[in-house]
Image: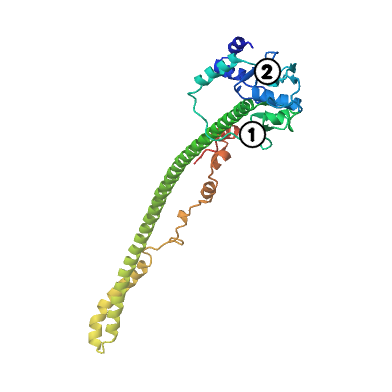
Amino acid sequence: MDYKSSLIQDGNPMENLEKQLICPICLEMFTKPVVILPCQHNLCRKCANDIFQASNPYWTSRGSSVSMSGGRFRCPTCRHEVIMDRHGVYGLQRNLLVENIIDIYKQECSSRPLQKGSHPMCKEHEDEKINIYCLTCEVPTCSMCKVFGIHKACEVAPLQSVFQGQKTELNNCISMLVAGNDRVQTIITQLEESCRVTKENSHQVKEELSQKFDTLYAILDEKKSELLQRITQEQEEKLSFIEALIQQYQEQLDKSTKLVETAIQSLDEPGGATFLLISPSLSLCLPHSIVEASKGCQLGKTEQGFENMDCFTLDLEYIADALRAIDFGTALWEAEAGGSRGQENRDHPSQHGKTLSL
């Protein structure tokens, strides 16, 4: 057995050495005593004896009163046929070199922590450990099942190698899942950041929109106050004019009323002398009062429709339509006027949503 070349090929000498110390029957490390066949292959004595007994069912073991001259044994590694003497497997030489190597190896590995738990046993062969893996049936089994049992025609592999292979595959799957989880977490982080930015942008445009409408409200309130002031001013001017006319006509009416009362009182005088003493003054006053009364009717008066306020009629329908048409995009009046900015917005719409135009 070329141990040196095998150790050089592998970067881990201890691991490669362990592979060289595996029995091809039980697929575990050789158990003392180790026998060496004429073909230079090694076996555990117990494994070699089990195979020899199965191949020579009529051969009796040592100490028996009846013993055949020997038997045949076929190497499980190279299929070389060995003719045994009457001692059978016990007549084979022990490989002390391999046994010494195993002792050294175990001393080197003694610092490794022991695994907890009992080793599972084969259900068919209760004394045999499950130490190989049937690749055909994809189940773990024991070496006796491979040699004599239901897995005799199956392809098997060392349990440790299958374990390492599946463990490696599982680690690869875990790595892939972890990498996938990392990608998903990255996407989640990006989406959460997108939510945060969306909220911030929404809050910002809401503030801008509120400011623009507040500006509109302020302009409308200012214009409303201005127009109401003009109406109030016109009202005061008209009322002042009307009240002045009323005052003039009231004074003329008071004078005429007093003259009428004086004239009536003179008519009530029974004495002619007294009446004639008063009448001259009345004769002088009455014509003048009548003339003044006639002139009083021409003091002034309002024209027809003077009290109307039609000049303050305000047509806001087109403005109302424009306000109703306010939207996140080109303003209505810009669209109607065919403004350059509106045309540019139509030709190059925003990729991130519409912009507010007020």
In the image, residue 211 lies at what x, y percent?
42, 43
Residue in view at x 30 percent, y 82 percent: 264
For disc 2, the neighbor class at 10 Å (few under 14, some 14 to 19, many from 20) is few
Vertical comparison of 259 with 186: above or below: below
Q: Secondary structure at mark 2?
A: helix
**Towards the viewer: 233 or 261:** 233
State which quadrant residue 50 falls in.
Answer: top right
Q: Report crowding for label 1: few under 14, some 14 to 19, many 20 or more residues within 10 A (C-alpha).
A: few
Q: Position of residue 233 (x, y in %)?
A: 36, 55
Q: Which residue is mark 1?
A: 127
Of the residues tagged 1 and 2, which is closer to the observer? 2
Question: From this viewpoint, which residue is outermost toward the bottom?
Answer: 270
Q: Earlier in the sequence, mark 1 or mark 2?
A: 2
Q: From what the image shows, is residue 262 above or below residue 115?
A: below
Taking the image as shown, residue 137 lies to the left or right of residue 14, namely: right
> 34 and 323: which one is in front?
34
Residue contact between numbered discs 1 and 2, judged by CB atoms under 8 Å: no
Q: Quadrant of residue 51?
A: top right
Residue 249: numbered disc = none
- Residue depicted at 69% across the width and 32% down the height: 138
| Disc 2: which residue | 91
